[in-house]
Image (cartoon, helix red, strand yellow):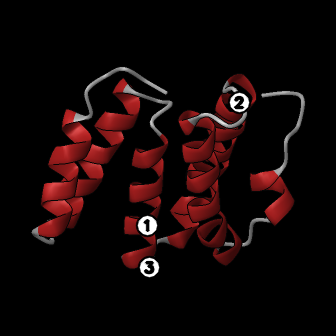
């Protein structure tokens, strides 16, 4: 997981709360640019795209999130809080992934390549 402070993600959450959708999306994208391993940002952005009916934008985003999560899970020590958080985020991402046509084994699989 990244040590970068999630300022842009927090700002995006504020914009999302205030229903300023485009501003929220821009902030989430900046947050991902600054911290590409921040799975919480992937999840929140994917959820926002779904809310706005832009599921087609989710597929690539969720595929990348799944790759990041699987790579992180392989590095994390089983039984640790980090490992559990990655599992929780993968579990939260999976239903959105399936809604946009992804297959469960693609997001939840544990391939050897990252």
- Residue at point 43% right, 67% down? 47
In the rendered image, the quadrant that contains the C terminus is top right
Badge 2 or badge 1: first in the primary sequence:
1
Residue identifier under label 3: 53
Residue 20: x percent and y percent? 14, 66
First-in-chain label (2 vs 3): 3
- In the depicted view, which residue is nearer to us: 43 or 85? 85
x%, y% of residue 22? 22, 60
The crowding category of the residue bearing disc 1, from other C-alpha atoms within 10 Å (few below 14, some 14 to 19, many at least 20), is some
Residue 35 located left or right of residue 56: left
For marks 2 and 1, give the one nearer the viewer.
2
**Residue at screen point 61% across, 34% down:** 80
Residue position for label 1: 47
Q: Is residue 22 left or right of residue 83?
A: left
Q: Which is closer to the viewer, label 2 or label 3?
A: 2
User: In x, y percent, where is residue 96?
Assistant: 59, 70
């Amino acid at each position: 997981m990244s040590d970068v402070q999630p300022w842009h993600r927090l700002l995006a959450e504020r914009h999302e709360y205030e229903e300023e959708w485009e501003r929220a999306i821009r902030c989430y994208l900046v947050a991902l640019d600054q911290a590409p391993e921040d799975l919480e940002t992937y999840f929140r952005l994917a959820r926002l795209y779904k809310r706005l009916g832009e599921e087609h934008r989710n597929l690539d985003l969720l595929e990348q999130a799944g790759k990041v999560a699987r790579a992180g899970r392989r590095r994390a020590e089983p039984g640790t809080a980090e490992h559990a958080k990655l599992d929780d985020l993968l579990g939260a991402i999976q239903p959105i992934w399936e809604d946009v046509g992804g297959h469960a084994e693609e997001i939840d699989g544990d391939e050897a390549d990252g």
